[in-house]
Amino acid sequence: MIKSVKPIFVVLVFSSLISFSFIEKKDPTEKLVPGDKVPIPVLENEKQTLDLHAGEGKYTLLSFWAGYDAMSRMKNAELCHALKNSDRIKMISVSLDRYESVFNAVVEQDCLESSLCYNETGGRTSELYKEFGLREGFANYLIDNDGVIVAKNVSAGDLASYLN
């Protein structure tokens, strides 16, 4: 009996060691993390600099999304609706859709505040995409009045804790 257990034990230990090598580790190439100063976003197609200043004691939520990326679009709409009546967090929403017509349709369908929605038609090839180190699913950044990232990829539920 003990002779048959020993090889099984060896196989289990060996397979455990192999499985640990496949555990996903934090990406060391992540560009922007909380505590970093946020770069000033510039839209290439309009040569427009986005004003991230929200006012004293207030925050700016900079959200990146695209109409073709269902998850980022859903998160962006959720955040926008959660902040509709907030005066403590200003939301700036940046679409990475290549076509202005798609951007306009999504803004209308999702009932987004069009005055705070912008479109970067360069999409994934834009400097903005590279500068913020965006990937699939995109990202959002909660930024304080000094331009420092307070949190990254916040949900609508997380915002309640920042508002209190």
Image (cartoon, grey):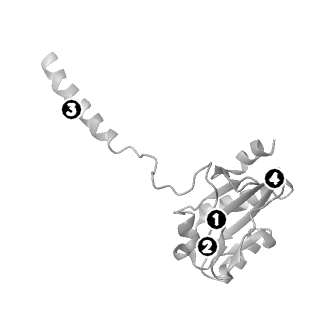
Q: Which residue is mark 2?
A: 96
Q: Amino acid at mark 1?
A: Phe
Which residue is at the front of the view, 48 or 156? 48
The answer to which of marks 2 and 3 sits earlier in the sequence is 3
Q: Amino acid at mark 4?
A: Lys
Task: Quarter of the image for the C terminus: give it.
Answer: top right
Q: At numbered mark 1, what does the secondary structure look like: helix, strand or loop?
A: strand
Residue 105, x across and y down, in percent: 71, 77
Q: Residue at x 87, y 56 (%)?
A: 85
Residue 25, x across and y down, in percent: 42, 46
Residue 117, x across and y down, in percent: 74, 71
Residue 6 appears anywhere in the view:
yes
Q: Residue at x 61, y 52 (%)?
A: 36
For label 3, the crowd category at 10 Å Cα-Cα, with few meaning under 14, some 14 to 19 and many 20 or more, is few
Q: At numbered mark 4, what does the secondary structure look like: helix, strand or loop?
A: loop
Q: Residue at x 56, y 61 (%)?
A: 137
Q: Nearer the viewer, mark 1 or mark 3?
A: 1
Quarter-wise, where is residue 19 in the image?
top left
Q: Amino acid at mark 3?
A: Val
- Determine which of the numbered discs, if any, sits on residue 11 in the image: 3
Q: Amino acid at mark 2?
A: Leu
Quarter-wise, where is residue 98 in the image?
bottom right
Callout 1–callout 2 Cβ contact below 8 Å:
yes
Q: Which residue is mark 4?
A: 58
State the separation of the CA atoms marked 3 and 4.
57 Å
State the separation of the CA atoms marked 1 and 2.
7 Å
